Image (tube, rainbow, N blue to C red):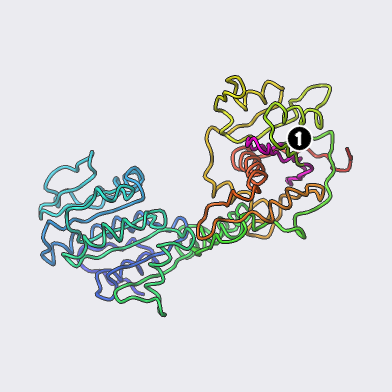
Amino acid sequence: MAKVLRAGERAQLTNPQWDIYSHGWRPDCRFRVAVCGRRFGKTFLGGEEMRRAVREAVRQNVSPENEIWYGAPTFKQAKRVMWNRLKRSFPEKWLAKRPNESECNLTFKSGHIVRIVGLDNYDNLRGSGLWFFLGDEWADAKEPAWTETVRPMLSTAHGHALFIGTPKGFNHFRDGYLKGQVGPQHEPGWWSRLYTSLAGGNIPPEEIEAAKRDMDLRQFRQEYEASFETYAGRVIYAFSRAGNVAECAYNRSLDVHIGMDFNINPMSATVWQERDGKLFQIDEIIIPTSNTDEMSDEIARRYGRLEGMAHIKVYPDPAGAQNRTSAQGRTDIGILRSRGFTVIAMSSHPLVRDRLNKTNAMFEAADGARTAFVSPKCVKSIEAYERQTYKEGTNEPDKSSGYDHIVDATGYYMFGRTAVIRPRVRPTSFGMSR
């Protein structure tokens, strides 16, 4: 669509940004939903949308009691993303006074107020009317923020809204997108579009190809192709016996990498070695009703060497940094270090979805490459990778089956090793058996 600018509009928008912008303030597009891949340029577009909302409020003689809001899942996030951009979007001559830095709002000579809000405490936002609402990272916002707070506030002035973000499964963001599509779920006044990262025009094609190598297929589709991906079914969906199960014997000349989950029943660890940029699970250690001391003894028995234990590198559950009364006040991580193991511990838990995304990407990335392989002797691990599922209707792994301990152990290793510390692989062979 050709850009036809009205007074006060600027031409720096990309064509996809302009597509969203040009549909604003039309009766059939009162509620717009823009589903975008990463690096689409949402922040710049947001500043332009807020600027226009002020102009429309003045032009249409809207009462200043109806405010203009930029909302994000949290206030801290909203301030970090948009506040500085927002201040740059308006000429000083429009403002009645200096920006309010503590509350993050702008007051205009017309009396209208533009405000930054966090949607985590949406009940505290009720009161004023709304003329325009921009909901950023909408898939991460709480759905009742719209239905219980924002939507009713738009009613007085017949206000407009724009929801924008990257998908996160089948949730309210997807529901809003479907309302704007042609079909049985369409609702009058709703408009929606989907834009991939490449279509956004801000990421070169070679970067897209690089992302395919680093991410699993579903994660890539969600983040870069703006695809709504369901999290129903298997947690480790990228793993397959045909593609990831392969003979891989212990090689004494290589370091041993161990992912460890500290659940007491059972204590679980997966044992890996690395060669030529590939990860090979050579063993699994599962000890019912056990503790970290016993697990350390078993690791040392299987993989210890006379010259020491530093070649054994453990990637533990970050919760192991906590003192435990059952261990006489020692920490699980402290116990591992006292045995001479090299412990590579994260300071805090990664997000579950980030850890699982990394695990899936190792079993099969978006470009089809497989980096992680499992020995057929690791029967319990293969079963866990194949059988752990999500709780029905959620994106939370089901822990009732017990398969999560092995999956978590492997995830701590893969995330800690490949997302935090890039592996340095020595040119050696897996040909030596135990």
Residue occupying the far front of the picture: 289
Viewer-side residue, 191 vs 20: 191
Residue occupying the far bottom of the picture: 183
Task: Tell me: 193 left or right of 352.
Answer: left
Q: Quadrant of residue 309?
A: top right
Q: Give percent across and percent down for residue 416.
A: 62, 39
* Up/down of 170 relative to 80, above or below: below
Q: Tell me the quadrant of the picture where the N terminus can be found.
A: bottom left
Residue at the image position 33 percent from the left and 75 percent from the top:
187
Viewer-side residue, 48 vs 119: 119
Main secondary structure found in the magenta portion: strand
Neighbourhood count class around disc 1 (C-alpha, 10 Å): few under 14, some 14–19, many 20 upward: many
The residue carrying mark 1 is: 256
* Up/down of 193 relative to 240, above or below: below
User: For the magenta stretch, what is the residue range?
Assistant: 258-283
Q: Give percent across and percent down for residue 266.
A: 68, 39
Residue at the image position 72 percent from the left and 49 percent from the top:
372
* Up/down of 28 relative to 194, above or below: below
Q: Quadrant of residue 431?
A: top right
Task: Tell me: 322 left or right of 105.
Answer: right
Q: Amino acid at mark 1?
A: Val
Q: Is residue 268 magenta?
A: yes
Secondary structure at badge 1 equals: strand
Q: Is residue 311 magenta?
A: no
Q: Count every numbered label the image shows and give the total.
A: 1
Q: Tell me the quadrant of the picture where the C terminus can be found.
A: top right
Q: Give percent across and percent down for residue 406.
A: 67, 44
Residue at the image position 75 percent from the left and 55 percent from the top:
244
Viewer-side residue, 54 vs 103: 103
